[in-house]
Image (cartoon, helix red, strand yellow):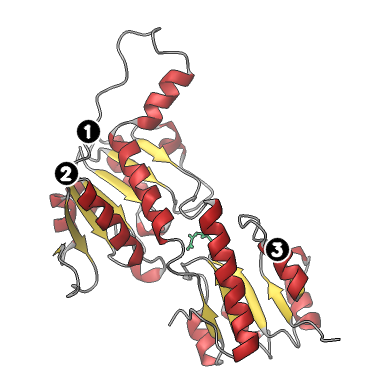
């Protein structure tokens, strides 16, 4: 009888169709989130653990990594990995994998859903109908804004940013982008200064990575440059936008609309946004389709199995 590899699962992957079950079937899983004393559990059970399964939600910090003397691989469910201490992992020769590509289209689709919902006031219209106001009050909801043919600014032209940009061509939009560096392999216009991109754009879509390097990249100046009719969309990470500045700009009428799937302190959402008709709010569901969550689960499990079979994960983060 072969013994199962011992792994640590940092949190429950309840948003995945069958990840918890498949992990439990294949591996000797220590469910870290169920341990009342995490430090004591690691000291007692950590020896012999060769892999961690996690997600951006749960992360893997240096303390966890260094508490596991036999650790060789960290396999994350999801594309973002700003909460995993990759440096600490690499210093120990631990491989880190994520699940790129498989979620790109669904996240890009959701960005477009938010753009259209924001511009065409779909949330407000839905609330109006559900409240039984249609036919009860004079008129309808305030006029929205046209989407087709407008100017689309992308903050972060990576895989997801590009997929959002491609969809813009189908809507006859002009597309420009801001990145740390100009890309030679795309035809979209480049803006070296984010405020310039915001001043030009009708829609500014945040698709950059999270983490300290991009925290509050979208600040008061950027939001005010986008202007009173401008629409900001975020499908990336909440902290990329200075949320207090966003609320202030909306309240002062200096920004047209915020359509958000992610928040600075999620799952907490500022009361001012909840009350605002200028905001469209979703609970971080960019990748949340059956097909994509299944594909993320499969790729996470394939990375784990590949490490155990060949010594190499398939999609390393760097
Ligand atoms: C996940 C995500 O739902 O992949 C990512 O980086 O943001 C989402 O797809 C979630 O963050 C995993 O924790």
Helix, strand or loop at label 3? It is helix
Q: Is residue 91 visible?
A: yes
Residue 223 seen in this snapshot: no
Label 3 close to label 2 by CB (< 8 Å)? no
The CA span between labels 1 and 2 is 10 Å
- Read off the residue under disc 3: 20
In the picture provided, is 84 more to the left or to the right than 256? right
Question: Which quadrant: the C terminus?
Answer: bottom left
Where is mark 1, residue-wise? 145
Asked if ligand 1 lies within 8 A of label 3, the reply is no
Secondary structure under tag 1 reads loop
- Give me the disc on residue 150: 2
Q: Position of residue 141 (x, y in %)?
A: 32, 20
| Label 3 CA crowd tier, 10 Å (few <14, some 14–19, many 20+) | some
Nearer to us: label 1 or label 3 = 3
Q: Which sits earlier in the primary sequence, circle 1 or circle 3? A: 3
Dividing the picture into quadrants, the one containing residue 255 is: top left
User: Which of 61 and 231 lies nearest the eye of the viewer?
Assistant: 231
Q: Residue at x 44, y 51 (%)?
A: 262
**Cα distance, mark 3 to mark 2?**
44 Å
Foreground: 184 or 250? 184
Residue 121 is situated, as x and y percent measured from the top left of the image, at 33, 31
**Residue 150: percent from left, percent from top:** 16, 44
Please tell me in which quadrant of the rendered image residue 53 appears.
bottom right
Q: Earlier in the sequence, mark 3 or mark 2?
A: 3
Rendered residue at 24%/24% (across/down): 143
Give the mark count: 3
- Residue at 71 percent across and 66 percent down: it is 22
Horizontally, is 161 left or right of 69 in the view?
left
The answer to which quarter of the image holds residue 45 is bottom right
Residue occupying the point 76% across, 63% down: 34
């Amino acid at each position: 009888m072969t013994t199962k590899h011992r792994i640590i699962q940092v949190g429950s992957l309840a948003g995945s169709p069958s990840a918890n079950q498949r992990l439990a079937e294949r591996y000797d899983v220590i469910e870290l989130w169920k341990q009342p004393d995490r430090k004591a559990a690691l000291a007692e059970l950590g020896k012999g653990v060769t892999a961690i399964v996690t997600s951006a939600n749960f992360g893997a910090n240096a303390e966890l990594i260094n508490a596991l003397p036999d650790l060789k691989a960290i396999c994350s469910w999801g594309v973002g990995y700003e909460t995993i201490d990759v440096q600490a992992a690499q210093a120990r020769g631990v491989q880190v994998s994520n699940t790129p590509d498989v979620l790109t289209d669904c996240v890009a689709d959701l960005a477009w859903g938010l753009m259209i919902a924001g511009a065409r006031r779909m949330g407000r219209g839905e609330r109006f109908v559900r409240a039984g106001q249609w036919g009860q009050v004079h008129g309808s909801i305030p006029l929205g804004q046209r989407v087709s043919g407008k100017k689309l600014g992308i903050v972060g032209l990576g895989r997801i940013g590009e997929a959002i940009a491609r969809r813009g061509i189908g809507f006859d939009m002009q597309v420009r982008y801001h990145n740390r560096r100009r890309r030679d392999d795309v035809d979209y216009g480049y803006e070296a200064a984010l405020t310039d991109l915001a001043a030009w754009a009708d829609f500014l879509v945040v698709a950059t990575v999270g983490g300290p390097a991009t925290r509050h990249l979208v600040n008061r100046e950027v939001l005010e440059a986008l202007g009173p009719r401008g629409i900001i969309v975020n499908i990336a990470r909440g902290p990329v936008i200075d949320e207090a500045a966003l609320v202030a700009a909306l309240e002062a009428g200096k920004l047209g609309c915020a359509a958000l799937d992610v928040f600075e302190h999620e799952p907490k959402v500022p009361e001012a946004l909840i009350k605002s008709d200028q905001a469209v709010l979703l609970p971080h569901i960019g990748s949340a389709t059956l097909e994509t969550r299944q594909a993320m689960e499969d790729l996470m499990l394939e990375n784990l199995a590949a490490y155990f079979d060949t010594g190499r994960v398939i999609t390393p983060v760097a």
